[in-house]
Image (tube, grey):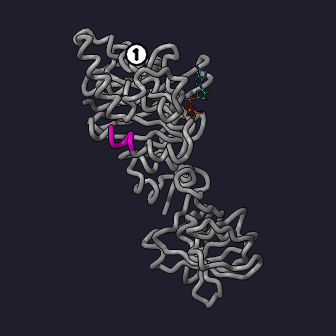
Amino acid sequence: MAEVTLDALRKEFDRGTIVAVDDIDLEIEDGEFVTVVGPSGCGKTTTLRMVAGLEEPTSGTISFDDEDVTDIHAKNRPVAMVFQNYALYPHKTVRENMAFGLKMSTEMTTEERHDRVREMAEMMGIAELLDDKPDELSGGQKQRVALGRAIAREPEVFLFDEPLSNLDAKLRTEMRAEIQKLQKEFGVTAMYVTHDQEEAMTMGDRLAILNDGKLQQVGAPTEVYENPINRFVAGFIGSPSMNFIDVDVDTSGSSTTLTNESAGFEIELSEEYLRGHTLHDSSYTLGIRPENVTVIENPDGSELVRTSVEVVEPIGSDNYVHLTLGEDFLARSRPEIKPEPDQTVGITFDDSDLHLFDPETGEDVF
Ligand code: ATP
C-alpha cells in the first residue's frame, strides 16, 4: 500500500482571499488510519479532495510513497473515495455500480469483474441486493454498496468524506466498526474526514485536528485527549467539553494561588501540585475536564474550592452537575452524587488533570 505525505500543502480560493488549507504537513504511514477532524469550514474536505486529485493545490506537494502525485490526474491515482451522499448512479443496479470502477481496469476480464463484485457484495452483506437500484435501498445499504465499490478497486489509499453523516446513530456505530475492520483487513492506508469529535475519537490510529485551515495537532486519540497542545484542541476534543476559567496567578505567598474573583474561584497549589512548573504572576486560562472534577456533597475542608450547584442533569450512567463557577462549569459525577440546586458543595481535582493555557496564544503551558 502507500505512505501518504502532504508537504506544505496549501489551497487558496477567490484569488487568495480564502485560505482553505494553510501549509499543512502530514505523514500518514503505510496502512495507517488517520482521521481528519475539525469544525465546519476548517479545510478538511479541501485537503481530502487534493489528495484525491479533485482539487489542485495552490502550493505544496502530495506524495504516495516516494512518488510526487501532485500533478497526476485523479483517475490515475490509486485512491478510492467514499462520500456522505454515496455517489451511486441512480439508473444502474448495485452490480453495475460496483462494477463501474473496475471497468476502467483493462487487465480484468468480464468474468473476473463479475466474481470480484460478487465477492465484495458477499463480504458487505449485500449479495441479495445486486439487482436492485439505489433508490430501493436504505441509507445503510447504499453506504455498503459505496464501500464495496471502493474496496473492489483495490485502492492503495482509501479516502472517506463524512461517509456516515446521513445514517442514524445506531447504524453509524455499526458502520464505524465495519469500516475499521475492512481497512485493517485490506491493510489500506486511510484518511477519514469528520466534523464529529466523538467519531474521530473512536476511529483511527491517529487524529489530525484542523482549525482555520491550520493543522493543530496530530496524535493518537488518548494522547490528544490527555495532552492537548492548545486551548482549541482541549475544547474541541472530549464531550462534554473541557471547563475553562480565567485565573490570575499569584506566586508571592508560600503557595501559588489561582483566583478568579468574580467567579468566586480561588485555589492554592502546592509545590507538589505544580510538578516543577514555574508559573508567573500573570493571567492564565485554567482547563479541567468534567470527568476529572470530583464533587464533594458535604465540603469537609479537603476540597480545592467551594461553590454552589445550579442544576443536576442525570444521564443514566452518570450525573452532570452544573456549578456556579464562571460561565458554565460542569462536573461529571457518579449517579449517587445528587446535590440539590443552590446547595454548597466542594470540588477537587487531581493535579495531573489540570491544564493551564496562555490566554494570548492558547498554548498549553502546564
Ligand atoms: P465542512 O465540515 O462544513 O464540510 P470543511 O472543514 O470540510 O467544512 P472545506 O469544505 O474544506 O471545509 O472549506 C474550507 C474553506 O474553504 C471554507 O471557508 C469554504 O467556504 C472554502 N471553500 C471551499 N471550497 C471552495 C470553493 N470552491 N470556492 C471558494 N471557497 C471554498
Residue 273 x, y percent position in the rendering:
48, 76
Residue at mark 1: 96
Q: Residue at x 54, y 78 (%)?
A: 269
Identify the secondary structure beneath mark 1.
helix
Is residue 283 something that shows in the picture?
A: yes
Q: Please check the rendered image and state whether residue 20 is part of the magenta-colored stretch, yes or no.
A: no
Which sits in the foreground, 112 or 350?
112
Q: Residue at x 44, y 46 (%)?
A: 174
Residue 63 x, y percent position in the rendering:
32, 25
Which sits in the foreground, 267 or 94?
94
Q: Residue at x 26, y 9 (%)?
A: 106
Up-down relation of residue 262 to residue 176 (above or below): below
Residue 39 x, y percent position in the rendering:
58, 40
Q: Is residue 223 left or right of residue 209?
A: left
Residue 147 x, y percent position in the rendering:
40, 30
Which amino acid lies under the numbered mark 1 shown in the image of this protein?
Glu
Give the residues drawn in magenta, as a range.
178-182
Which sits in the foreground, 120 or 356?
120
Task: Report the residue that reaches farthest toward the bottom.
Answer: 300
